[in-house]
Amino acid sequence: MTYTNVVAKVSHKAEVLLPLRKWLFFLLLCSPVPAVANAQLEQQIHSHISAEVLKFARQLGAQGQIKQELDLTLPGGLSKYGRCSKLEISRSNNQQAPWGRVSYSLNCKDKISWQSRATARVRVWLPVVVANQAIQKNELLTEAMLGTRLTELAQSKLSIELNPAALVGMQTKRRIQAGQVISRHLLEHKLLVEKGSHVLIRVQTQGFEASTKGVALEDGQLGQRIKVQNLSSGTVLEADVVAEATVQSIFKSH
C-alpha cells in the first residue's frame, strides 16, 4: 500500500483565513478514506491467514507458543472496495503449509461483488524438537536428551518433529550436536526385543520385584508395550520394553 502526502501551495496575495469548522471539513475531504477502507480489507485477509497458519500448525502437532509474521500485498484497485461482509478467501494448494510465499483468491459476494487476488509472505516459528545435549552415533534417545525450541520453518522442510516423546527409543545414525534440530532422517528404529526371542521379564508388585524368563510374542522398541509369554507358567501378559531383551510388567492384585 502506497501513501501519498499532498502539499498545497498558498498564494500570499489571495490569503484567506477560513473558520475552524471549514478547516475541519477541508481536512476531512483530504483524508485518505480509500487507505482506511483498504486497511479494513487487509485486516480481514490477515485474520484469515493467521487462523489458517494456526490450524495447520496444530494439525502438525505443535504445542505451546506459535509465532508468525505476515507481509500482505494487494492490488491497488482494491482500495475502493473496503471491507467485504461476505468475503471468501481460498488457495489452490491448501494441502501445503500456508507459509512462505502464498497466493490467495478473493471473492466478495456483497451486493457489489468483485474478485481479485492477494499475495502473502508468511514466516512461521514452531517449537521443534532439538537435542538438549550432544548425542553420539548409535545412541538410543531418551526423554532427557530431547527438548523443544522455537524455530522458523521453510515450506520445503516439513520433516520437522514437534513431539519429543515420539522419538524416544529411536537410534541415532550419526552424532548430533547440542541444540541441533532433530528430524527422522537422522534416526532409525531400534528393536530392543524381537518377536520369538527370549527375554527377561521383571515383575513389580507391592514393594518387591521378581524376574523370570519368557519369550517375546511381538517386536518391541524402548518404552513400547508388547505381549510376552512366561516360560514357566505359560501365561501371556503385557509388559513394557525397558532395555535390550528386558521387559517389565506391573502385577495388579485383585
Image: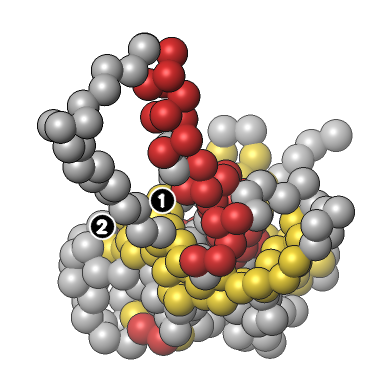
Q: Earlier in the sequence, mark 1 or mark 2?
A: 1
> Between 99 and 179, which is closer to the camera in this rendering?
99
> Between 172 and 42, which is closer to the camera in this rendering?
42
Q: Residue at x 41, y 51 (%)?
A: 67
Q: Residue furthest front?
A: 13
Quadrant occupied by the N terminus: bottom left
At label 2, the amino acid type is Asn
Provide the secondary structure element on which disc 1 rests.
strand
Quadrant occupied by the C terminus: top right
Compared to residue 76, the image places residue 143 above or below, namely above
| Lateral position of residue 236 relative to residue 184, left or right | right
Q: Which residue is mark 2?
A: 132
**Image quadrant in which you'd find residue 108:** bottom right
Determine which of the numbered discs, if any, sits on residue 182 in the image.
Answer: none
Q: How is the image coloured?
A: secondary structure
Q: Residue at x 75, y 66 (%)?
A: 114
Say few, some or many: other residues with alpha carbon within 10 Å of mark 1 (under 14 / 14 to 19 / 20 or more): some
Q: Which residue is mark 1?
A: 67
Compared to residue 181, the image places residue 49 above or below, namely above
Instruction: Residue 12: give x, y in percent of width and height.
Output: 13, 32
